[in-house]
Image: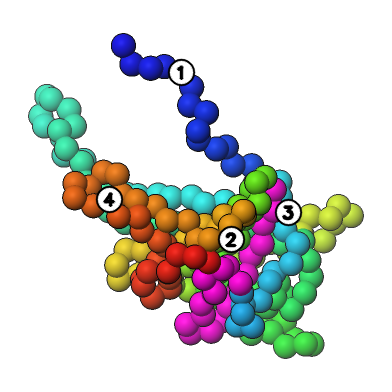
């Protein structure tokens, strides 16, 4: 009989801290240890209850046989959207809210396009960083002013690159500071641990 004892080896992640970094550079990168350089700008404090939303959608075409029902289906048009809520009023959030505006003139806003890096930390201090491989579309549909401190919610669209990639991901262990390696388990003949890919699709060396 199969062992039905719950596993105690899998860790549960409770995300206790998060940051969003924004870059308008053409080719921004981060250090292997997760350090952000001057080409990245921090959005400031975030609303933890809102979290980072990440929604994924596909369109589906179904083939139906007469009197039999659906016999096959094909998916296309993958779409990735997300969002975050910034609490601070600073240069970065003001730009994302009203790109193209001046100090004294607010122009009709259009969505901003920028590279985003989502940085989250769990209860053990481990860090996961997701960096968009292409510039994301960022828009604030509403900028309310109320007696409650609500912040500004940004809607984000993520775009795939020519390889179908959405994000580069780095996972940093809190104890060693090393980049986590992950070995394939579902491909015959491939069992060498792999490290995350950077914004160029290149392998990030292990060791942090």
Label 3 or label 1, whichever comes before in sequence order: 1
- Mark 3 neighbour class, 10 Å CA radius: few under 14, some 14 to 19, many 20 or more: some
What residue is rendered at 34% in x and 51% in y?
183
Closest to the observer: 65 or 24? 24
Q: Is residue 148 left or right of residue 75?
A: right
In the structure shown, which secondary structural element does the residue marked by tag 2 occupy?
A: loop
Rounded to the nearest angstrom, the CA distance separating label 2 from label 3 is 27 Å
In the structure shown, which secondary structural element does the residue marked by tag 4 occupy?
A: loop
User: Mark 4 or mark 3, which is nearer to you?
Assistant: 4
In the structure shown, which secondary structural element does the residue marked by tag 3 occupy?
A: loop
Which scheme is used to colour this image of the protein?
rainbow
Quarter of image, res 195 = bottom left
What residue is rendered at 66% in x and 76% in y?
41
| Residue bearing mark 2 | 177
Label 2 or label 3, whichever comes before in sequence order: 3
Q: Which mark is residue 191?
A: 4
């Amino acid at each position: 009989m199969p062992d039905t004892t719950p596993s105690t080896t899998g860790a549960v992640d409770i995300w206790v801290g998060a940051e969003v970094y924004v870059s308008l550079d053409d080719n921004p990168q981060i250090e292997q240890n997760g350090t952000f350089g001057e080409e990245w700008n921090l959005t400031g404090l975030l609303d933890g209850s809102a979290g980072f939303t990440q929604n994924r959608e596909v369109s589906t075409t179904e083939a139906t046989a007469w009197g039999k029902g659906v016999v096959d289906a094909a998916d296309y048009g993958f779409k990735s959207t997300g969002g975050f809520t910034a609490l601070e009023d600073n240069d970065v959030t003001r730009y994302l809210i009203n790109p193209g505006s001046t100090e004294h003139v607010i122009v009709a806003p259009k969505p901003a396009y920028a590279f985003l890096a989502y940085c989250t930390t769990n209860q053990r201090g481990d860090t996961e960083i997701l960096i968009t491989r292409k510039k994301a579309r960022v828009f604030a549909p509403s900028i309310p002013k109320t007696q409650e401190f609500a912040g500004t919610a940004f809607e984000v669209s993520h775009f795939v690159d020519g390889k179908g990639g959405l994000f580069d991901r780095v996972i940093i262990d809190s104890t060693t500071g090393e980049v986590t390696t992950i070995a394939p388990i579902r491909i015959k003949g491939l069992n060498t641990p792999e490290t995350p890919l950077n914004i160029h699709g290149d392998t990030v060396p292990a060791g942090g």
